[in-house]
Structure formats: C-alpha cells, structure tokens
Image: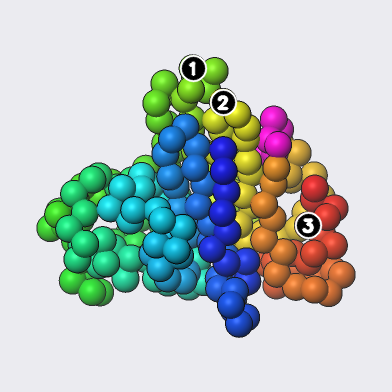
Amino acid sequence: MRICFFGTSSAIPSAGNGYTSFVVELAGRVVLVDTGDNALSRMLDLKIDPTQFDAIVLTHEHADHLGSFPALIAALECMNRSKALTIILPPTLTPRVLKLLALFDYYPERLGFELSFASEWAVSGGTDTSRGGARVELLPGNHSEFTMMTRFIAEDGALLYTSDIRYRSGQYAAPARGCDAMIHEATYSSLTLPAETRHSSALEAGRAA
Ligand SMILES: [Zn+2]
C-alpha cells in the first residue's frame, strides 16, 4: 500500500498546502480520498492518469472535503474518461452529492462513464486480502452528521483515516484494530478544544494514536 498526500491543511489552506486529500494505492488500484481542492492537478503531478484511477472516498459534506467534486467530475468528462468510477461515501450523503452535481448540470446517467455509489468496496480477490484482495470500509465517525472514518485493508497493510473528528478517548481502538497506520485530521494547534468545535487538536491526535 502506498499513500501520497495532496494537502494536509484543514479549512484554511496555507501557501503550497491545500485542503486535506490524498491517494492510496492498494492491490494495484488507486483511490482518491476527499476532493476539497484541485485533486486532478496533483494527480497529474504524480503521473496518475485521471482517466484510469478507480474510486473516490468522500468522508463528509464539508466544503474543504467535498467542494471540488463537481469540478473533478466535469474535468473527467472533458477528458473523455470511459472507465467506471466508484464513489465510496456514507449512503446518507449520496443525495447531497447528486444535488451538487445537478447544480452544474451533471447527472450520473448522462456521463460518458459509469458513476456508481457504494458504502464499501472490494477489489481483486474480493475481501480475501491473503489472495491479493483489498477492501475499503466506512466506519462511524464523530464530527458532522455524515462523517465516516475510512479503513483501507490490503495484503501488505491496513490504514485508518479518521477524517475530521471530535476527540473522544477510546473511540479509535476498535476501528484501528489491525491497522499499521492512522491518519488523524487534527485541526487546531491548541492543546485541547471545546467539544463544540467538533475537531481535535494535535495533542489529541497523539493521544488517539
Ligand atoms: Zn469537516
């Protein structure tokens, strides 16, 4: 499994560092995680062919994670993508995503490629990672109404991405079981945060680890 970050900023990007987004390569497939920024441009920087990557995870509805999704779909359409693309997202988020696409006159049934929506995803060998398979699972998060954590499992490792998350002691042990690494979106530099911010600090990310 390989990971490359496209950005690690939260809602306020800094010079040269955009909203949190990354790609995961597992079992020969490429999965983009969140689309706040211009992920397509970063894909091209990495020599990833935008017409060939396999899936997009949308962790929740906030603009810094989802904002550029319609522009990305529009660009793929302009590039004559024909390969099917799976969007992995909380099922309750699907109507909002469809609305967002419709705002720009994009509808899955009118695209030149199949756009499907799923809450989990398995590739090559199904869920049996010992036979080279891999899977992507969504697990309950703790941030907004829709937020999900994402677990990537392949033969050579497993990764948990918490996305934005409100720190709560003990909520990470079960989702992270068997994982080799955790990506935790810590948003504030202060040591602890009032619960109403619905985010965690760097210290709390350390405690979670
Ligand atoms: Zn958020």
> Is the CB atom of the residue marked by disc 1 within 8 angstroms of ligand 1's nearest atom?
no
State yes or no: discs 1 and 3 in contact (Cβ < 8 Å): no
Range drawn in magenta = 175-180
Q: Which of marks 3 and 2 is nearer the N terminus?
A: 2
**In this picture, residue 6 sits left or right of residue 165:** left
Of residues 69 and 93, the one drawn nearer to the viewer in this rendering: 69
What kind of secondary structure does the magenta stretch mostly adopt?
A: loop
Query: Amino acid under label 1?
Result: Arg
Task: Give the residue number, with chain letter if any, for mark 1.
Answer: 131
Give the foreground label among 3 and 2: 2
Determine the secondary structure under disc 2: loop
Q: Is residue 156 above or below residue 109?
A: above
Task: Give the residue number, with chain letter if any, for mark 2.
Answer: 155
Q: Where is residue 54 in the image (x, y as percent from the top left)?
A: 36, 44
Q: Earlier in the sequence, mark 1 or mark 2?
A: 1
| Picture residue at 50% right of the left edge, 37% below the top | 26
Of residues 117 and 85, the one drawn nearer to the viewer in this rendering: 85
Q: How far apart are marks 1 and 2 (CA)?
A: 7 Å
Task: Give the residue number, with chain letter if any, for mark 3.
Answer: 205
Query: Amino acid under label 2?
Result: Glu
Query: Amino acid under label 3?
Result: Ala
Q: Which of marks 1 and 3 is nearer the N terminus?
A: 1
| Picture residue at 56% right of the left edge, 38% below the top | 1
Colouring chosen for the image of the structure: rainbow
Q: Does the magenta stretch include residue 178?
A: yes
Q: Does the magenta stretch include residue 26?
A: no
| Picture residue at 53% right of the left edge, 57% below the top | 22
Q: Quadrant of residue 106?
A: bottom left
